[in-house]
Amino acid sequence: MLQNYLFWFFQRCSSPDEALSYSLYTEEFPAIQDAGISEAAPTINYNTRATIGTSADGRHYYLVQFDVSSLHGKTIDKAVLQFTTQGGSCWSSHLRYVCNRDIHVVAYPVTTSWNERIVAWNTAPQFDETKELEKIIVDDPIWNKNTMYEISSAELDDIVWQWAHDKDNNYGIVLMSTDETITYFNQKDVVIATKDQKTNPAAVQLVVTYH
């Protein structure tokens, strides 16, 4: 992991002298607010539970926001969103073995304000689907509990830099599943640890390396 990061870092520098002149710092940012929203319960607020996926009744999204205003004036070298699975479900009207348990999760930047204590599906903020931050596969959350996953990309680096330099336009990120096929007989989702998680698995956080 360290070797891969060092290779990536030196690749971004125009010369070895430029790389050696950097003093790199890494900081962990806990979420300042997060919430789950569910199409199945469009008026209910889930500010302590987060599910991503689809069910017979609709889709489930996760909203999360971080305060990185302390990085104003800094150069963002790498930003990583970390979240940990707590379990999941997968069933269908067919035999269980035909249910593909992997969850395809994608992240987009949120573009309007929201409040974790009152947000629900019917009052959900807008997000920009033209700016995909990352798409990953969560491997079978039914069995692979307490597993950490990471979302990182150049697009996420840019978004974090924008948040640091314009905190009034920091509305966070939405995570959702791209497995959007919804039928009465199929359900597939993953539960992740929110910011209110005090013990293992680790709570959601943003890890930023900067100089």
Image (tube, helix red, strand yellow):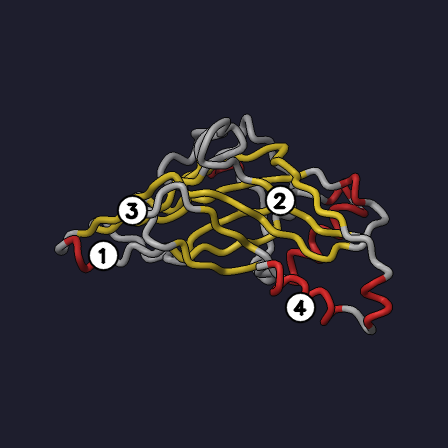
Taking depth in this image into account, of 139 and 111 the one nearest to the observer is: 139
Local SS, label 2: strand
For discs 4 and 3, the disc positioned in front in the rendered view = 4
Residue 173 x %, y % = 59, 47
Which residue sits furthest left? Answer: 95
The disc, 2 or 3, on the residue closer to the chain's N-terminal end is 3
Q: Can you tell which mark lies on residue 7?
A: 4
For discs 2 and 1, the disc positioned in front in the rendered view = 2
The disc, 2 or 4, on the residue closer to the chain's N-terminal end is 4
Local SS, label 1: loop
Q: Is residue 47 visible?
A: yes
Q: Is residue 153 above or below residue 170?
A: below
Circle 1 residues within 10 Å: few <14, some 14–19, many ≥20: some
The disc, 1 or 4, on the residue closer to the chain's N-terminal end is 4
Residue 120 x %, y % = 49, 34
Q: Amino acid at mark 4?
A: Phe
The disc, 4 or 3, on the residue closer to the chain's N-terminal end is 4
Q: CA distance from mark 2 to mark 4?
A: 22 Å
Q: Amino acid at mark 2?
A: Leu
Q: Amino acid at mark 3?
A: Trp
Horizontally, residue 66 falls left or right of residue 34, namely right
Which residue shows up at 59% across the image and 57% down it? 152
Residue 3 x %, y % = 62, 64
Q: Which residue is mark 1?
A: 99
Q: Which residue is mark 3?
A: 143
